[in-house]
Amino acid sequence: MQKRIELLAPAGNMDALHAAVSAGCDAVYLGGMNFGARAFAGNFSHEEMKEAVRYCHIHGVKVYVTMNTLLFESETENAVKEAEWLYHADVDALLIQDMGLFHVLHETLPDFELHCSTQMHIHNEDGCRLMKKEGAKRAVLARETPIELIRKCVQTGIDIEVFVYGAICISYSGQCLMSAAIKNRSGNRGMCAQLCRLKYTAEDKDHNQIRTDGEYLLSPKDLNLIDKVPELIEAGVSSLKIEGRMKRPEYVWLVTRTFREAIDAYYAGRKYEVSEERLTELLEMFNRGFSLGHPFHADVKDRMSHYRPNHRGIQIGTVVKYDKGRVLVKLSAPLSQHDGLRILNTPMDTGLTAVKIEKNGLLVNHADPGDLVWLDCHSKPIPRKGQPLQKTSDSALVDRIAHAILSDPRKVPVTVEYTALQDQPLKLKAWDEEGYCVETETSFLVQKALKAPFTKERMEEALSKTGNSAYEAVFSKDSVLGNVFLPVSQLNEARRVLLEQLDEARALRHPDRTESKPYAFHLNPVISDDTQLLVLGSDEPSQLPHVRHVQASGIMPVVREEDASVPENAVLSELGDLNHPLRHCIAGMTLNIANSYSLAWFLSHEGIDSVIVSSEVNDENLKKMLDSFEKRYSFVPHVYRPVYGRRTLMYIKNGFMTEKASYLRDLEGNVFPLVYEGNLAKVLEPAVLRDENMGKCSACILFSDETSAEKKAIERGIYEEISGRIQGIRS
């Protein structure tokens, strides 16, 4: 029988965590101060993490911690120590991107549940099968995965987690180099600059500007699969994930509560439909427009938000006129004091807050549809007649949710049994639906009632006063109450002790965890060749010695939803490739290999004899990586480093605009070539990457649109530079 689906909510800070638990989530995901893909969220210190884990476990909620960034050699030991600390802090699971960290934790903490972050780029059955064999409990599928493929991935036996609400990346996660290449802020390391939310113009092959339906050409709408909850449950999905570790607690509560209602309705056999009121609240809280996204085949117009990259809110009126720092608007929806507002304007929107609302010459704290009201507006640009007025924050809604979080805390039902007999201690017992059971008895003896005996109603009323605890008491029919008298103070103290014991029992969910095992992974020397230069993407074999050549057809696709065999001498591009028999293959740059543990994991697979390291690894980190590898495994691995080529900065499924442009141009003048392969649009970097490759490894050239003559000249020039350097080292 399939388990009930899990509702997984984001928690960027402690307030958001309390909101998620209050709203009914089954698990939360959050980040520590390091190694998480949301470096700019509030995140949790060690003390806060311990508090969060205890609070969640007492309330029956699991805690997953994100350690889903690419790790350099200088960070690996601290990352492992942090994971060990989280293991002993009773965290339920870790979300991992880096295969090196996954590998060492699986070796040293084999009972720690590990999840494949969407940053790991699991997007097909092969990837799911591979990671299940490697010991992963769960795979968070790429947001681009269609429902038909989700069903197939479920059948591989690994738990499947699917994003269902919130912001989505335009590029496949784990494969976006845009922020790193342009702003030196790596998305793979949690510091994405969100360049997809900026303005671009599209150009044809002759660099003529193409007319588009907006300027934010790479900005997607937000995902909203609330109406698809039944289909996802029936597909066998294990967990529904809400995005939003950067969002406010009220947002977390509202979205979590909505999905909680939808899930509960399904299991109760009821059809759930989002009410108009709830939909308005969701739109007011945050939206860029909603879409069913790739999981349910939304077309490009339905997926993209070319006109606005930020929170739209809802339209509540129209500008009538502007006069000396005030704007007159006609309302089409209610407006309350302190609501956040935005007038849709150019070249940017005009922001304001309803600090004062003037209606018919009087200040009011609320106005209704049809009213004409004046609002203070000192922001630029100046509003113009006819422009839409959007409500982006509803003060009453925020206050109402904040009150609900505090006044309607989540309660765990527990059964309480009491035994109160003359000349015996008062005995209390409590147990929950998860099987946790505690007992206590008083040091005093129950006295015979001399006048009015203590009634069942008084006993249960006293024991029901669970206050700020996590519990709601129901009473066992096996309880026994004699003709006795009980001091209320003693009864209250016994109840307090019982609930504290229940807290302690529920708080620790993994009592059998032990010390980590030593890392004792043995790697046999991997036999390769004496290649000094790897040339990718040229159909003309090299005439130079010590050069390894792979044609474009031998480079496996980065995105591969269908099954495909891997030829000999291929460059592997995604983890699913490793689920096939391999012969004399190279682990490619898009596998994000950046440390010695990751390097060892890939080389441990039969048929892989060399590796291309991530282009994000600099000279210093490369040297540390290779030195550590040699010291730990006692041989020198065959590693290539990219020294020339135009990297793909984004891989976009089914495009991002209806027209097929040849180039994108940003406001800083960077021009990004576009390449189309099947249903994939690839955004290439503006300038060719050039690196002198001063590390002690071989070099890699990645050709794209160079002419045959250019390829030969580039290959010979780089070859001669490398050969000269190697000869200099040897002499």
Image (spheres, grey):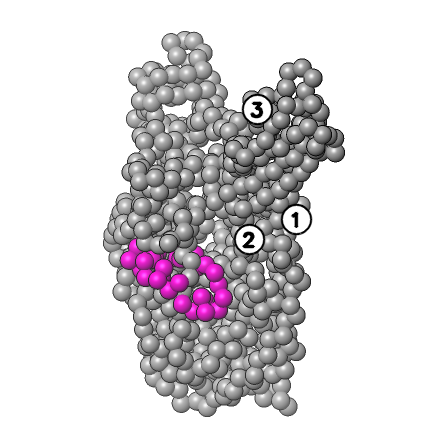
Along the line of sight, which residue is nearer the eye, 406 or 654?
A: 406
* Residue 349 % position (x, y): 40, 34
- Which of disc 3 and disc 1 is earlier in sequence? 1
Report crowding for label 1: few under 14, some 14 to 19, many 20 or more residues within 10 A (C-alpha): some
- Asked if one can make out residue 347 in the rendered structure from this viewpoint, the answer is no
* Residue 529 % position (x, y): 50, 88
Which amino acid is tagged 2? Answer: Asp
- Residue 302 versus residue 412 in the image, above or below: below
According to the picture, the residue beneath numbered tag 3 turns out to be 456
Which amino acid is tagged 3? Answer: Lys
Proximity of marks 2 and 1: CB atoms separated by less than 8 Å: no
Label 1 SS: helix
Q: Which residues are magenta?
A: 129-157
Q: Count the marks.
A: 3
* Residue 692 % position (x, y): 54, 74
- Which of disc 3 and disc 2 is earlier in sequence? 2
- Please identify, in this view, whether the residue under mark 2 or under mark 3 is nearer the observer: 3
Question: Which residue sits at x=36%, y=77%?
Answer: 566
Answer with the quarter of the image where residue 108 lies.
Answer: bottom right
Answer with the quarter of the image where residue 67 lies.
Answer: bottom right
According to the picture, the residue beneath numbered tag 2 turns out to be 92
Question: Which residue sits at x=47%, y=42%?
Answer: 25
Which amino acid is tagged 1? Answer: His
- Residue 300 versus residue 533 in the image, above or below: above
According to the picture, the residue beneath numbered tag 1 turns out to be 46
Label 3 SS: helix
